[in-house]
Image (spheres, rainbow, N blue to C red):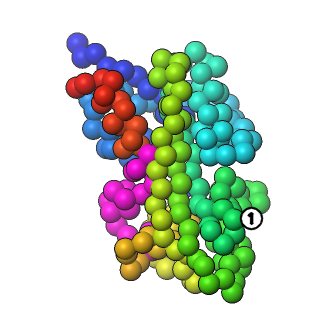
């Protein structure tokens, strides 16, 4: 029988789990989502940084008795807005989460700004048999004047990564998944896992 290490990924988003499984490519790691473990409580993300929020997700699952857990928090930081919307990316324009209104608010706040530099951030918190480590990933780019493209989610229609002539929302999923902030943070975690669990 195959020996594997089970890791709980503190997300209910099956798409994210599949994306990370593809990055890992490690048969000895079995990723399980919150749905898989039937975790339905709300996790309050009231940290002040991406790290704190990622840790809060891990701690919520650790309370259930698990010791191998991934928590991830992501968002968009805009230089001319001193890093806004940052950890408030999802709820930038208030509750409930509305991506279209978030984009409108961001474009309005950037009206007249010549510096349109921004970056997506992904912070992964990993609990490995109770020991905590963090892994970060970034993708740098700029905020466009208007929305373009229909793919993706969130701020994708106004984010053009450096080196590309089009936005994340115009990009094939596969390309975005191979250059994104999440790809980079989880690739760092994969390296760590490979060093600890040779296949
Ligand atoms: P989450 O932590 O992955 O749920 O991301 C929080 C928020 O950051 C999302 O609701 C989006 O507004 C924004 N965000 C994170 N990653 C992306 C991305 O890849 N594209 C567009 N928006 C993103």
What residue is at 64 percent from the left and 27 percent from the top?
A: 60
Left or right of 147? Residue 41 is right
Figure quadrant of the N terminus? top left
The residue under label 1 is 93
Q: Nearer the viewer, residue 105 or 197?
A: 197
What residue is at 76 percent from the left and 57 percent from the top?
A: 95
Q: Assign a secondary structure to mark 1.
A: loop
Left or right of 143? Residue 175 is left
In the image, the residue with mark 1 has its CB under 8 Å from the nearest atom of ligand 1: no
Residue 109 appears at what percent x and percent y? 72, 76
* Segment tinted magenta in the rendering: 167-185
Figure quadrant of the C terminus? top left
What residue is at 67 percent from the left and 46 percent from the top?
A: 49
Q: Quadrant of residue 167?
A: bottom left
What residue is at 25 percent from the left and 24 percent from the top?
A: 198
Compared to residue 141, the image places residue 83 above or below, namely: above
Provide the major secondary structure of the magenta segment.
Answer: helix
Residue 168 counted in the magenta span: yes
Q: How many numbered marks are there?
A: 1
Residue 8 appears at what percent x and percent y? 48, 28
């Amino acid at each position: 029988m195959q020996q594997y290490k089970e890791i709980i990924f503190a997300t209910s988003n099956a798409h994210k789990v599949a994306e990370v499984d593809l990055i890992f490519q490690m048969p000895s790691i079995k990723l399980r989502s919150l749905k898989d473990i039937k975790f339905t409580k709300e996790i309050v993300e009231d940290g002040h940084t991406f790290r704190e929020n990622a840790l809060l997700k891990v701690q919520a699952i650790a309370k259930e008795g698990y010791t191998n857990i991934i928590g991830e928090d992501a968002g968009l930081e805009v230089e001319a807005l001193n890093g806004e919307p940052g950890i408030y990316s999802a709820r930038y324009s208030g509750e409930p989460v509305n991506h279209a209104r978030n984009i409108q608010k961001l474009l309005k706040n950037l009206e007249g700004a010549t510096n349109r530099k921004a970056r997506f951030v992904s912070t992964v918190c990993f609990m490995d048999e109770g020991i905590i480590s963090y892994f970060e990933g970034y993708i740098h780019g700029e905020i466009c004047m208007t929305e373009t493209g229909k793919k993706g989610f969130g701020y994708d229609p106004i984010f053009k990564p450096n080196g590309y002539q089009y936005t994340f929302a115009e990009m094939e999923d596969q390309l975005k998944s191979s250059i994104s902030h999440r790809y980079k943070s989880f690739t760092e975690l994969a390296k760590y896992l490979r060093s600890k669990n040779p296949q």
